Image (cartoon, rainbow, N blue to C red):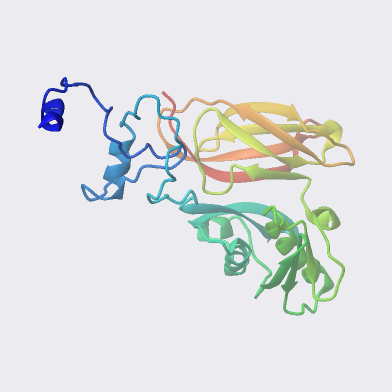
Amino acid sequence: MVLVLAVGCAPSRSGSLGPAPSVAAPTTGVPTTTGAVPGGPATVASSAATATPAAGSSAPPPPSTGPVASSRPANLTLELWYVRDGRLVPTRRTRPATVATSRLALTELVAGPNPAEASTGLVTLLPAAEVSRIEAGVATVRLPEALDPDTARLREAQVVYTLTQFPTVRQVAFGTAAPAGRVDYADLLPAIVVTHPVIGDRVSSPVTVSGSADVFEATVSVRVRDAAGRQLATAFTTATCGTGCRGGYRVTVGYRLDREQPGTIEAYEVSAVDGSPTKLVSVPVTLAATR
């Protein structure tokens, strides 16, 4: 009886034990999946992001177990090097992304130029090509034998310039030959190379023209022509090296045009003799109208 009365007469205590434990917010950097079924993992992650941890809690949040979206891009832009008049010319392709980038690049190289590129004289000299391995920055490639030595070098140059765009490839070995890089085929480049824009691009004003050049006093001139061949704008710049060495260049030129139409970007050297354009490179593009 004494025990019962002691318990029954104990003073009543009120208060809170703190908020109930909740799911901790996901760790930073985990993307939220959209379009998930309500109540699925994405919904839970979204709700957890707004939850307030218990006061005074110092325990680290549990590791996230929700889905992590892939950061790999959906598409891949490749730089391909074809041949025109015995010299290398770059262009580009955009294809669905793949981990086998070298194989994809050689497949596109063998397939050859598209109709717009072919109309400007671009060709491929590769009937076939296959990467057997890539090790320590060297890609080993098998090519069919070419009877003409000049054709053989151009074939190899197409492969070398195309594959060395990738960070995993610095040089290319053909069979048992010593590995070679871009510098070993630099003599097969034209005096002026335009890497941007490429044939078929749609450009807007101001358009940036870039590439490499080996020209007199390193001076590269650029102009924009409309569908009728009228000159819309000109500009010039200085490459990082010239007159016996190759350097990079980049110049921006603005133009005015009331409607979208086919046009041409031209890069050239001004003759020191009579001021005429020499070593000219023409790139057919679509010119967007200006406002």
Q: Nearer the viewer, residue 268 or 182?
A: 182
Q: Nearer the viewer, residue 106 or 191?
A: 106
**Image location of residue 15, percent across then percent down:** 22, 21
- Residue occupying the point 73% across, 34% down: 249
**Image location of residue 125, percent across then percent down:** 69, 69
Left or right, 143 with reference to 78? right
Residue 273 in view here: no
Q: Nearer the viewer, residue 282 or 241?
A: 241
Q: In the image, is residue 134 above or below residue 284?
A: below
Which residue appears farthest toward the right when viewing the image?
244
Residue 241 in view here: yes
Q: In the image, is residue 124 above or below residue 117?
A: below
* Residue 231 found in image quarter: top right
Q: Nearer the viewer, residue 14 or 246?
A: 14
User: Which image quadrant: the C terminus?
Assistant: top left
Left or right, 200 with reference to 181? left
Q: In the image, is residue 144 above or below residue 154?
A: below
User: Which image quadrant: the N terminus?
Assistant: top left
Count the numbered circles shown.
0
**Image location of residue 152, percent across then percent down:** 79, 71
Left or right, 286 with reference to 103? left
Which residue appears farthest toward the front when viewing the image?
2
- Residue occupying the point 85% across, 57% down: 184
**Image location of residue 287, percent across then percent down:** 48, 37
Q: In the image, is residue 46 above or below residue 133?
A: above
